[in-house]
Image: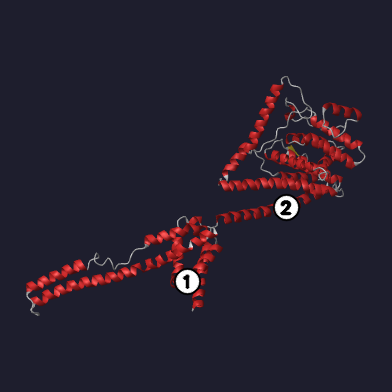
Amino acid sequence: MDAHEGVTEPDVEAAQANTDQPHFANTPPPHPESSAQSADVSQPKKTKSGGRGSAAAAKAAEERKKSELEGELREIEPRAVPRDFSMRVATRITAINEREMDESIASGRVTELVFRNLKDADMHMHYLDMVNLLLSDPDTSKYAATTWAGLIWHEEEHSEYREMLQSLIKTYVDAHLVNARESKEHEDTGKYFSAFATHMGEVFIQMMRISADLYDLVTDIYTSVIKMEMTRDLGKKDEDERKGKKGTSPKKKEEKRNFNPKKLYDDIIDFVSARGDFKSDNLNQKNPNEFIIVLADRMRSTRRYVIQDIMNRHALDKKKQLEKELREREAGAEEVITSAAPFNMGLYYYWVEKRYNFKYLAVEKVRITLQVLGFLMGLIAVGTSYLQLMPLDLPDALLISVMMIGWSKLFCSKFFFIAFYPKDVTAKLEEEVGLFTPVFRKMSKSQMNSFINRQVHHGENNLLLHLMPEYFKYIFAVMPDRNNLLMSKDELNEVLERLEVSIAKYQRGSR
C-alpha cells in the first residue's frame, strides 16, 4: 500500500503482512469515544438502514452547529472509527520510517498519510492516541517527534499542513481547558500533569533527543500554544470588561464546568522540568537528562519573551482601539464652527446677567430715595404748620401731607419704575448655553484649545475677555452629564489655565 492513501482495514492488514509488526510497550486501551456505532470516513461500516444513518448524521451536524454558535469550549467528539484505528496508523508510520532509507522521503509520506486521515478536528484525539502509542515504545518514540515535525518541514510545499498544525494545537488547548482527558501522574515526583501537557512535553523531549537543531520547531509549536491561550484569555477579559461583569461570575461558571486553572504552556514546562530531574547514586554520576533541563530553561525564556510580546501588542492594539473610539466620539469640525455663534451670544448674556444686580440696586436706591423724600416733605409741611413757622393752615398742611404720602406710594412704586429695572436674561443665557454644551462634551483637549484661541482673537469679544474664564467655569458648572465629558478633569484644568494665559498674551499684544 502507498502511504498516500487512507488507512483502511484491508490496507493495514496487507502492510502488516509485508512488514514486521512493531511492539508498543504499555499500549493503552482504545479511547471509549472510539467505539461509537456510526460510520467512519476511513472505514465506513454498513448500517441496516441508510435513512437512519443519514438522520443521525444530520442530527450530529445540527448539534455541532448549535454548539459553535453558542461559542462554548468543549472537547470535540471524534467520529466513529475502529477500536484499533490509532494502532493501525502508528503501525503504518513505523513501517514507512523503517522501510524508507531517505528520512526526508519517509517524513513526507508520513505527513501526507497523517494529513489524509487525521486532518479533521474530530480526528485530532486519534492523532493524540497514535502519537502516544509511538511514544510508549523507545524504538518508535523518535517517530512521534518526526510526525509532529513533518507538519512544519513540509509546510512550504503544502500550506495545508500549517493549518492542520494550528488546528491540532487549538484542539489540545481547548481540551486541556475543560480537562477532556484524565491527568497523568509522573512516576518519580508523584505530580499530576494534563494529558495534553504530558503528550506535547514528551514530543519536545524526543525532538531534542534527536537533535538540538530541532529547538526551532519546539519554539514554533510552543509559541503557538502560548499565543492561543493568551489570545483567548485576553479576549475573554476584554469581553467581560465591555459587559461589565463582576469577578465572581466567571469563577462560578468555571467551577461548574470543571475548568483547568493551569495554563497548558505552564503545565508543559513543569512536565519537562520534572522529566529532567535525576537522582544520582553517587557524586560522580552524570545526569543523562541534562539536555531536558536545558530544554526547560530555554522554554522558560521563550515563554517569558512571547508573553511579554503578546502583552505589548495587546496594549498597543487596545490603545489604538481607544484612540479610534475617541476619534469617533469627538465633535466634528462643522459642529465646532457652528457652536461659536451661540458661545459669543452666551458670553454677552453672561455679561448682562453679571450687571443685573448692580443695575437693580441702583434703580432701587433712586426709588426708595424719592419715596422717603415724599414722606419727609409731608411731615415737614404738617410740622411747620403746627408750629406756625410757615404761613400755612393746619388743614392745608394735612392735605399736603396726604398728597405727598399718596405720591410716594403711587408714583414711587415698582410698577411706575418697571421701565428702569434691568431685564432678566437668565432664560436666554441658559438657552444659548444649551445649544453648544453638547458639542463641548464631545470636544477633545486640542479641539477645545483651538476653539478658545479663536474666541479670544474674535473682535466682538475684546471688551468681554476678562469675563471669559468665569464664563467657562459657569458653562461646565451648569452643563448636564458632566461625567460624560471627553476630557478628564486634569485636561479641563489645563484648558482653563491656557485660556487665562492666552487672554493675557492677547491683551498685552493689543496694547
Residue nearest the observer in this picture, 419 or 295: 419
Image disc number at residue 209? none
Q: Residue at x 71, y 54 (%)?
A: 309
x, y percent for residue 145 = 83, 41
Q: Residue at x 18, y 72 (%)?
A: 374
Left or right: 137 with respect to 171?
A: right
The image quadrant of residue 115 is top right
x, y percent for residue 46 = 76, 22
Left or right: 286 with respect to 467?
A: right
Q: Secondary structure at mark 2?
A: helix
Instruction: Look at mark 1 in the image and give the residue it sits on.
Output: 459
Q: How is the image coloured?
A: secondary structure
Tell me: residue 466, above or below residue 209.
below
Badge 2 amino acid: Arg
The image quadrant of residue 275 is top right
- Going from N to C along the chain, the mark reached first, 1 or 2, is 2
Left or right: 231 with respect to 449?
A: right
Residue 148 visible from this viewpoint: yes
Query: How far is disc 1 from disc 2 in space, using C-alphas?
Result: 61 Å
Check whether the beta carbons of the residues at disc 1 and disc 2 lie within 8 A of each other. no
Instruction: Look at mark 2 in the image and give the residue it sits on.
Output: 304
Residue nearest the observer in this picture, 15 or 271: 15
Tell me: residue 308, above or below residue 132.
below
Q: Secondary structure at mark 1?
A: helix
Badge 1 amino acid: Gly
